[in-house]
Image (spheres, rainbow, N blue to C red):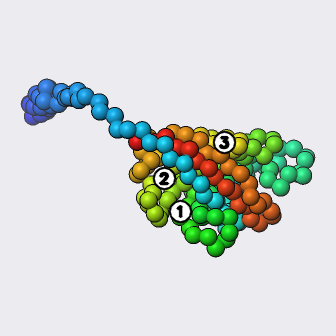
């Protein structure tokens, strides 16, 4: 019993010392913002159904209308190459990775995708997009040369058929 009391007092004393020694410390530093840069990018995403985009999850049929090739409530994983041009043999400059959820009855989608660059001036940098699949996507961040990026990404479908999709992207990015 005496040993239990002694151990309890030792723990209480140690605990009180830890609280005294671990006070929060901070130092206020002046903010010196870096100059803002605006970058315009143009590239092409090449998608092959079943290869660079696959269905991860799909809800049971919610209606008797099965006329849509892509049913409501489908979740897709995306890993598409980015190229400098619409031609299939144009230079690969990066890739698009992310997820897309078809949540609207008119096949509109909500997407979280990241455009990663692995060659050239922006090697190791990426742009993050989280937006609905309307004509313009919202740039919500980035890394590497696109730290704290904001902006818009406009896309234009070049080719859409049963197996392939080629989209042109025009990004206007504000970053530091």
Q: Is residue 68 above or below residue 162?
A: above
Determine whether, in the image, residue 35 is placed left or right of residue 18.
Answer: right
Q: Nearer the viewer, residue 168 or 29?
A: 168
Q: How crowded is mark 2: few (under 14 residues within 10 Å), some or many (20 or more)?
A: many
**Going 75% across and 43% down the picture, which residue do you hit?**
108
C-alpha span from label 1 to label 3: 21 Å
**Going 63% across and 52% down the picture, which residue do you hit?**
169
Residue 126's disc is: 2
Q: How crowded is mark 3: few (under 14 residues within 10 Å), some or many (20 or more)?
A: some
Q: Nearer the viewer, residue 12 or 19?
A: 19
Question: Badges 2 and 1: C-beta atoms under 8 Å apart?
Answer: yes
Residue 94's disc is: 1
Quadrant of res 20:
top left
- From the top left corner, tell me how far across and down residue 156 is, in percent: 71, 51
Local secondary structure at mark 2: strand
C-alpha span from label 3 to label 2: 18 Å
- From the top left corner, tell me how far across and down residue 127 is, in percent: 51, 49
In the picture, which quadrant includes the N terminus? top left
Residue 136's disc is: 3
């Amino acid at each position: 019993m005496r040993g239990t009391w002694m151990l309890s007092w030792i723990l209480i004393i140690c605990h009180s010392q830890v609280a005294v020694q671990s006070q929060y410390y901070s130092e206020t530093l002046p903010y010196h913002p870096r100059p803002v840069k605006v970058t315009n990018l143009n590239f092409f995403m090449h998608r092959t159904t079943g290869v660079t985009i696959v269905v991860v999850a799909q809800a049971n049929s919610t209606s008797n209308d099965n006329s849509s090739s892509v049913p409501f409530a489908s979740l897709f994983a995306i890993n598409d190459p980015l190229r400098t041009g619409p031609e299939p043999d144009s230079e690969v400059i990066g890739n698009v990775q992310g997820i897309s959820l078809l949540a609207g009855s008119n096949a509109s989608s909500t997407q979280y995708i990241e455009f990663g660059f692995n060659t050239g001036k922006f090697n190791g940098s990426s742009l993050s997009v989280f937006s609905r699949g309307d004509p313009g996507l919202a740039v919500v961040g980035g890394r590497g040369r696109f730290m704290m990026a904001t902006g818009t990404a406009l896309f234009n479908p070049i080719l859409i058929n049963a197996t392939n999709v080629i989209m042109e992207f025009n990004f206007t990015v504000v970053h530091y």
